Image (spheres, rainbow, N blue to C red):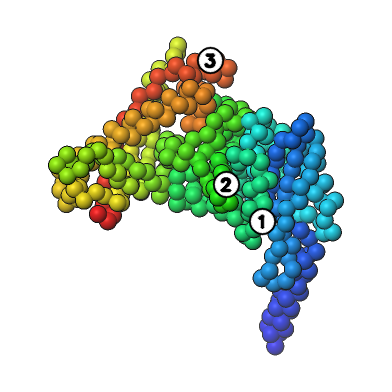
Amino acid sequence: MYRRKIFLVIILCAVLSACADQKIVNDICLVHAISFDTVANSMKSAVLISHFKEPGKTELDVLHTESNAIIDGLPRANARTNDPLERGQLRMVLFGKTRAEKGTGAVMHHFLHDTKFSSRIQLGVVDRDASDLLEIAKKTHEPFFLSDIIEQNIRNGNLPLMNLHVSLFNYYGEGRDMFLPYFKIDHGEVVIDGLALFRSDQKITEINMKDAFLLKMLIQNSKNGSYNVPVAGKASSKQGEDFILLRSMHSKASYIVNKVKPIPSISIRLKLVTELQNVPDWVDLRSEEQLAQLEKTMGSYFKKEIEKFLSLLKENKVDPVGLGDLVRSRSKVWRAQDFEEIYQVIKTSVSVQVKIAKTGSA
């Protein structure tokens, strides 16, 4: 009898708690995304919020404000609602192109010192005003639509691991630069078009999703990323090139600093295990000789692509790979300014070993 009473008390507490939570949710507006844009001499902000009307139904809305201060966006938006704004469900922060080029430092500084922001928040750059993207996200009726796109492409695509924690590490860490997803709007739909690359807090350039895969291989395991590799067709059947779509099963990059001064020299060795998909008809996947030749061809191809990619990074003076951090770890005396002056002429050699583990469908 005593146990039954205890059990009933627990059930009643759970029910009462559930009712209390439901009431709270109905009396607040949850903030899911924030955007920052530049307008004239001030900053334009927008917030994507949700109103819970009834179980199973959520209404999204976008509130626009204008202010000279980063921290003033949410309070100004709060003045436009009849329910208080709650940022516990914030998952996405967007910078418009102009704002990203002028600098994101004030926002990054605010996030670093405000512990109420989750380290899992995703950040991104838009090729226009970021508030335009929030208006499109509003129409999806999915509060986490934008952050879910990023996380899905990290798990199953070419994007390297990113979130607020990683971005703050890259922004404040010496010898490395920040990178963020780069959004475009294509025929009214949201598309991740690659990555925006930063020097300090300013966006310098952007790269496509193919180069995003190369960066992913250079800094972490590129599992589930995909890449189209050109292969020469048989002259007897077809002129020009065919393409093989590969999907990464595993990759690992290792770095050796051969020399620190006067000009650093770094060797990069990359191992890639992959499966093949969409293989041309003239490729005989049962032939060990052809598979070995494909591995060699792909290794040479990725070597050239990575060398071109590293040249692009040096040309733009951006270091998302963290080569500066690598040299710093091998140096007794290291200054960021000194490395920046020689970054464009540091020597990097690349070798790539490709192993075809699965062949997919021919």
Residue occupying the point 75% across, 40% down = 44
Identify the residue position indicated by label 3 in the image.
341
Nearer-the-camera pick, 92 or 98: 98
Of marks 2 and 3, the one in the foreground: 2
The Cα atoms of the two marked residues, 2 and 1, are separated by 14 Å
Q: Which mark is residue 226?
A: none
Residue 259 in the image: above or below residue 81: above
What distance separates the C-alpha of mark 2 from that of mark 3?
Answer: 37 Å
Residue 59's place in the image compared with 136, above or below, is below
> As rendered, which of 185 and 259 lies closer to the eye?
185
Q: Position of residue 241 (x, y in %)?
A: 26, 39
The amino acid on which the numbered mark 1 sits, given as a three-letter code, is Lys
At horizontal 42% and vertical 40% (from top left) the residue drawn is 210
Q: Nearer the viewer, residue 108 or 40?
A: 40
Residue drawn where x is 77% and y is 66% of the image? 26
Residue hosting label 2? 185
The reply to whether dot 2 and dot 1 touch (C-beta < 8 Å) is: no
168 shown above or below 63: above
Work out whether residue 332 can be spotted.
no
Left or right, 362 with respect to 195, comes to left
Q: Residues within 10 Å of mark 3 (few under 14, many from 20)?
A: few
| Mark whose residue sits in front, 2 or 1 | 2
Within 10 angstroms of label 1, few (less than 14), some, or many (20 or more) residues? some
Can you identify the residue that label 1 sits on?
Answer: 138
**Mark nearer the viewer, 3 or 1:** 1
Q: Quadrant of residue 37?
A: top right
Q: Give the residue at x 46% y 41%.
A: 209
The three-letter code of the residue at mark 3 reads Glu
Q: CA distance from mark 3 to mark 1?
A: 45 Å
Q: Which secondary structure, mark 1?
A: helix
Most distant residue in the bottom direction: 1
Name which residue type carries label 2: Ile
